[in-house]
Image: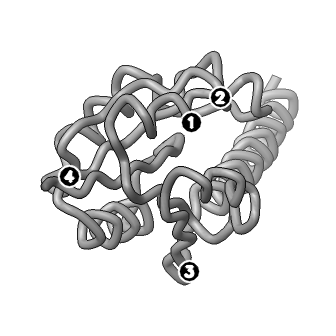
Amino acid sequence: MTKTVLTYGTFDLFHIGHLNILKRLKEKGDRLIVGVSTDEFNAIKGKKPVVPFEQRLEIVQAIKYVDLAIPEENWEQKRTDIKKYDAKVFGIGEDWKGKFDDLGDEVEVVYLPRTSGISTTEMKRVLSEFDERHVTSLKNTLDTLSQIVKELS
């Protein structure tokens, strides 16, 4: 009998932390199904992914640990998918600890530790700060050039 593991995520700016959690989840069963949050569902959750949904879905489907990548469109879908795919394990990152305990009446719920030193949120923050520094530097350069042009006129 096949043991199916089910997980969900946005998987934006795919990184080693994402890969690690998918690998660890695959080790918990024979088949790994991954729900990738749509852009519309992310908007409901207050998230704005950098990478569009179709690309994130394709990236996740290409990972060798993933047997099937599906769209995640709403919160209620988890319980529906558990039944639909006959999942035995629901796994997700420990940052969600306690949020899905109610699924324990149908599956084993597993919260896995995050990969130290990496997160999409932190990557976005660093990129955002870099962009602000870059814009400030560019503005200073343009101000200097403008001053030189004025002095030469």
Query: Disc 2 or disc 3, which is closer to the eye?
Result: 2
Measured in 3D between alpha carbons, the distance from the residue under mark 1 to the one under mark 2, in whole angstroms, is 6 Å
Asked whether the viewer can see residue 125, the reply is no
- In the depicted view, which residue is nearer to us: 114 or 141? 114
Looking at the rendered structure, the secondary structure element under dot 2 is loop
Measured in 3D between alpha carbons, the distance from the residue under mark 3 to the one under mark 4, in whole angstroms, is 28 Å
Which residue position holds label 2?
Answer: 76
Q: Amino acid at mark 2?
A: Glu
Query: Disc 1 or disc 3, which is closer to the eye?
Result: 1
The residue shown at (80%, 47%) is: 136
Which residue position holds label 3?
Answer: 117
Q: Amino acid at mark 3?
A: Gly
Residue 117 placement (x, y as % from top left): 56, 80
Query: Disc 3 or disc 4, which is closer to the eye?
Result: 4
Label whose residue precedes the other's in the sequence (2 or 3): 2
Q: Are marks 1 and 4 in contact (CB under 8 Å)?
A: no
Which residue position holds label 1?
Answer: 79
The residue shown at (47%, 56%) is: 90
Q: Which quarter shows the N terminus? A: bottom left
Residue 62, by quadrant, is top left
Label whose residue precedes the other's in the sequence (2 or 4): 4
Measured in 3D between alpha carbons, the distance from the residue under mark 1 to the one under mark 3, in whole angstroms, is 32 Å
- In the depicted view, which residue is nearer to us: 29 or 25? 29
Label whose residue precedes the other's in the sequence (1 or 4): 4
